[in-house]
Image (tube, helix red, strand yellow):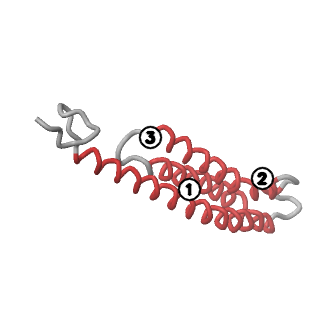
Amino acid sequence: MSNPYPGVSPYHPPDDANSVSKANSRSELVGFWVSFSLLTLAGIGASFLFGLMFTLASDSCNRGATGWLCDAKGPQVAFAMPWIAWALAITASLIGFGLRRRRVGALRAGVITGACLYIVIVGITWAAVVSVSG
């Protein structure tokens, strides 16, 4: 009996589903890096705009105002928070990608985790700025 699959044991023929999963994982990998790159660039722009907006919220502070935004370092902290959120989101995305890489269909879980982390941190900062600036 001749082997219909050269280079492969006749007892273990190649599985078509395996070749499909390899193609899916390759396309998922490309999808991860494309979405990661686009969200990274969007995060840079959003961090800059949110930082400016949070810093300008300190303009409503007057001499008798109290609160973290109205002291000397408040505007600097308000500007830095979106950038800290961006760095944490990048880190969480890459860690999530590394941990979930072996599971089929879960390569973008890292990007989703990073985006959610960014939204939560910026949202908390927004609420803190609004509570102080009125």
Q: Mark 1 packing: few (<14 Cα in 10 Å), some, or many (20+)?
A: some
Q: Does the residue at mark 1 contact the one at mark 3 (Cβ under 8 Å)?
A: no
Q: Name the amino acid type tagged 3.
A: Arg
Q: Nearer the viewer, mark 1 or mark 3?
A: 3
Locate residue 130, reporting x and y percent.
66, 61
The residue identified by callout 3 is 100
- In the displayed structure image, the side of residue 18 where residue 88 appears, left or right: right
* First of labels 1, 3 by sequence position: 3
Element assignment for label 2: helix
Q: CA distance from mark 1 to mark 3?
A: 21 Å
Which label sits on residue 77?
2
Which label sits on residue 119?
1
Q: Give above or below for 41 relative to 73.
A: below
**Quadrant in which the C terminus appears:** bottom right
Q: Nearer the viewer, residue 69 or 50?
A: 50
Q: CA distance from mark 1 to mark 2?
A: 17 Å
Q: Nearer the viewer, residue 117 or 62?
A: 117
Q: Name the amino acid type tagged 2.
A: Val
State the residue at coordinates (77%, 68%).
Answer: 56
Locate residue 96, reporting x and y percent.
50, 42
Q: Quadrant of residue 69?
A: bottom right
